[in-house]
Image: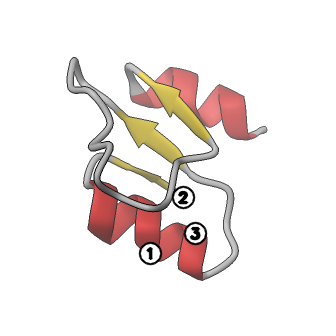
Amino acid sequence: MIGDHPEYDIAGGAAAGLRTVWLRRGRPWPESLPIRPTRTADDCATAILDLL
């Protein structure tokens, strides 16, 4: 799952058992969340390559 919303995209993907890539777009990961993305990326192309 590739997404830019920590709760909807990354937490949702993780709950479904998927590897996740968070598009950070210059933002830090919210440390208050108990989950972490599998990877982080600055753009979609890098995110897709990371998942392959």
Work out whether residue 3 or residue 11 is closer to the camera in this orientation and state it.
11
> Under tag 3, what secondary structure?
helix
Rendered location of residue 20, percent (x, y): 58, 52
Residue, x 50% and y 30% (percent of image)? 40
Residue, x 58% and y 69% (percent of image)? 14
Rendered location of residue 24, percent (x, y): 31, 29
> Under tag 1, what secondary structure?
helix
Vertical placement of residue 19 versus 23, above or below: below
Picture quarter with the C terminus: top right
Left or right placement of residue 10 versus residue 47 in this view: left
Work out whether residue 36 or residue 26 is closer to the camera in this orientation and state it.
36
Q: Which residue is mark 3?
A: 14
Distance (Cα) linking label 2 and label 3 = 8 Å
Distance (Cα) linking label 1 and label 3 = 5 Å
Vertical placement of residue 5 versus 15, above or below: above
Q: Which residue is mark 1?
A: 12
Left or right placement of residue 7 versus residue 11 in this view: left
Please tell me how many numbered marks the rendered image carries.
Answer: 3
What kind of residue is marked 1? Gly
Picture quarter with the N terminus: bottom right
Residue, x 64% and y 45% (percent of image)? 38
Q: Are marks 2 and 1 in contact (CB under 8 Å)?
A: yes
Rendered location of residue 3, percent (x, y): 37, 51
Q: Which residue is mark 2?
A: 1
Q: Are marks 1 and 3 in contact (CB under 8 Å)?
A: yes
Q: Choose the circle earlier in sequence order: 2 or 1.
A: 2
Residue, x 68% and y 56% (percent of image)? 19
The residue mark sitting in front, 2 or 1, is 1
- Residue 46 is labelled as none
